Image: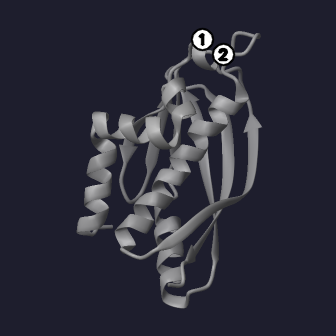
């Protein structure tokens, strides 16, 4: 899917290391402190990486589940923000449900990848067309650098066109 000029501008701001860090520091300071970083963002997918270390470690020498949840949510939320910016409309977004499963001990660098960009772009287009709220379930998987899957998440987002 080709991004609109607004969508490209948003993606370029997120891809810019300095601008993204300023965004995190102002809007999501815990994600900034924990070291979340965008590895990839386009209309199809978003990948957020999280280093393992003292900032997000629990007493059992693994990554705290809340730190994983934060980066997992960001991998879906960034796609939501990209779809909204791409539309050029005023649209509200909100997580309405969350499910998670932790399959292995996360004791290394983890990347959370969501490949549901098309679903979100379709949901934003539908709410723009109908004005009605749309629910969209997005999945993301956390994998360590060694290829071991450590967690998977499902976030249900509600998108709704704002009335002026």
Instruction: Residue at 46%, 74% (x, y): give it.
Output: 90
Callout 2 secondary element: loop
Residue at 52 percent of width and 34 percent of height:
29
Would residue 141 be visible to someone looking at this image?
no
The chosen color scheme is one colour
Quarter assignment of residue 52 = top right
Say which residue label 2 marks: 57
Residue at image location 36% in from the left, 74% down from the top: 88
163 to 141, vertically: above or below: below
Q: Quadrant of residue 9?
A: bottom left
Say which quadrant the N terminus sits in: bottom left
**Residue behind mark 1:** 54
- Mark on residue 90? none
Residue 80 lies, in percent from the top left, at 50, 60
Q: Is residue 35 above or below residue 124?
A: above
Is residue 27 or residue 154 the one in the foreground? 27
Residue projecting furthest to the bottom: 130
Q: How many marks?
A: 2
Percent position of residue 89, x then y: 41, 76
Give the image location of residue 95, x and y in percent: 67, 58
Q: Residues within 10 Å of mark 2 (few under 14, many from 20)?
A: some
Percent across and percent down for residue 84 are 44, 67
- Other residues around mark 1 within 10 Å, as few (<14) / some (14–19) / many (≥20): few
Residue 154's place in the image compared with 28, above or below, is: below
Asked whether residue 146 is in view, the answer is: yes
Mark 1 secondary-structure assignment = helix
Asked if the residue at tag 1 contacts the one at tag 2, i.e. Cβ–Cβ closer than 8 Å, the answer is yes
Q: Left or right: where does residue 4 sit relative to residue 54?
A: left
> Which residue is nearer to you in this view: 163 or 112?
163
Q: CA distance from mark 2 to mark 1?
A: 5 Å
């Amino acid at each position: 899917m080709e991004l609109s000029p607004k969508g490209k501008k948003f993606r370029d701001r997120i891809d810019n290391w300095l601008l993204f860090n300023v965004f995190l520091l102002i809007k999501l300071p815990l994600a900034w402190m924990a070291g979340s970083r965008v590895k990839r963002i386009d209309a199809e997918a978003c990948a957020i990486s999280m280093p393992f270390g003292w900032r997000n470690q629990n007493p059992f020498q693994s990554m705290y589940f809340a730190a994983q949840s934060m980066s997992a949510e960001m991998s879906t939320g960034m796609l939501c923000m990209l779809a909204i910016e791409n539309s050029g409309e005023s649209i509200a977004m909100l997580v309405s449900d969350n499910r998670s499963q932790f399959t292995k001990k996360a004791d290394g660098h983890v990347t959370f990848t969501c490949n549901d960009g098309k679903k979100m772009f379709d949901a934003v287009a539908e709410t723009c067309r109908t004005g009605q709220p749309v629910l969209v379930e997005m999945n993301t998987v956390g994998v360590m650098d060694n290829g071991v899957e450590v967690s998977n998440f499902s976030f249900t987002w509600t998108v709704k066109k704002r009335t002026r």
